[in-house]
Amino acid sequence: MLMVRNRVYKTDAVVLKQMPLGETNRIITFYTREYGKIAAVARGVRRPGSKFGGSLEILNHVEAAFGRGRSLDSVNECVVINSYKYLRQNLTAIAQGIYIAELVDIFGEDRSANIRLFEILSETLSNLDRYENSEFWVLWFEFRLLHFSGFLPEFIDCVECRSPLDRSDHTFNPVAGGILCPLCADSDVNDQSWVVSVTGLTVLRYFQRSLELTLGQADADISVVDLLDVKTFLRIYMRYIAERDFKSTGFLDLIKFKNN
């Protein structure tokens, strides 16, 4: 007997982005718990007094009901679970939230569930909503995004010869997928390689050893200076993996520049 999919389905989701469609509609991109990334039409959302109200604002954590369509599904109902109201009161936190939403939009797969990715997305938005150690939480999100997407490099042992790495600056080779010891770096360096400082590697190894742990605010109390090399490394590496620049980083960097 053939299995027939339900025409209407409901799931938890985070709103990643939206774009206009005609005069009154929008295409909304969600990252959902059960179905991965979904784009759906919210009909009439741009009309005054729309039934959706503000429920489809970017970064909202919602429970949404969808109707299946031939090319695009439709948003039938949407109820806000968490709007992260404190995050929205801080321009830096908004920029950071938009940045992680863009990362999920790029790395998340259409119609392919990744429950851990959904969980770290909603967890990170909750941490940004508190606006304590926000730089740490963005970096911790990026690191786990690489892990759950299958792109996490090796930081503890040499990726080529598997020898333990001493506490010093080392060369990172994105083609090989990790850090090289000095001997392997001499024979395997290329124009895509770069040096990662011992400070950056210390934090990256801490992240790698913590992947099975739940970190709290006490664990996030690392100085912004110590996080700077990690931020630079992850920004370069994620751009290498994505093979594109991220639109939101310009806005994020501008906000931080004005705050400094």
Image (cartoon, helix red, strand yellow):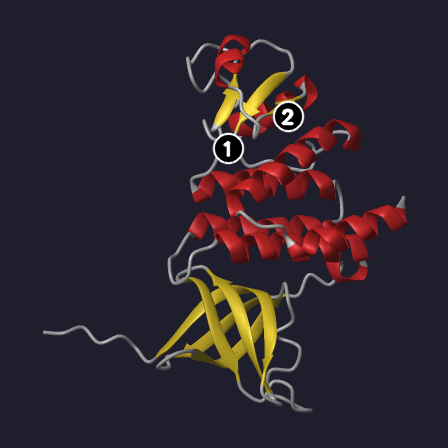
**Rendered position, 49 above or below 93:** below
Q: Residue at x 37, y 81 (%)?
A: 69
- In the rendered view, tell whether residue 19 sits above or below residue 183: below
Along the line of sight, which residue is nearer the eye, 119 or 42? 42
- Under circle 1, the secondary element is loop
Q: What residue do we see at 39% from left, 56% from top?
A: 113
Q: Residue 37: horizontal and vertical position, in percent?
A: 46, 62
Q: Work out whether 140 lies above or below 210.
A: below
Give the total of numbered labels. Answer: 2
Quarter of the image for residue 191 reads top right
Q: What residue is disc 2 on? A: 203
Dot 2 or dot 1, earlier in sequence: 2
Question: In the figure, is residue 83 to the left or right of 255?
Answer: left
Where disc 2 sits, the SS reads helix
x and y percentages locating residue 55 in the rendered image = 62, 75
The answer to whether residue 66 is above or below residue 171 is below
Residue 154, visible in the rendered structure: no
Determine whether, in the image, residue 1 is placed left or right of residue 243. left
* Label at residue 98: none
Q: CA distance from mark 2 to mark 1?
A: 13 Å
- In the picture, measured across the screen, residue 94 lies left or right of residue 70, that is right
**Viewer-closest of 75 and 26:** 26
Q: Quadrant of the C terminus?
A: top right
Residue 72, image x and y in percent? 42, 78
Give the x, y percent position of residue 165: 53, 12
Mark number, residue 211:
1
Q: Residue visible at 74% across and 27% down?
A: 226
User: What is the three-letter code of the residue carrying label 1?
Assistant: Leu
**Label 2 sits on what residue type?**
Val
Task: Decide which of 75, 104 is in the foreground and name it.
Answer: 104
Q: Quadrant of the N terminus?
A: bottom left
Q: Circle 2: is it few (<14), some (14-19), or many (20+) Cα within 10 Å?
A: some
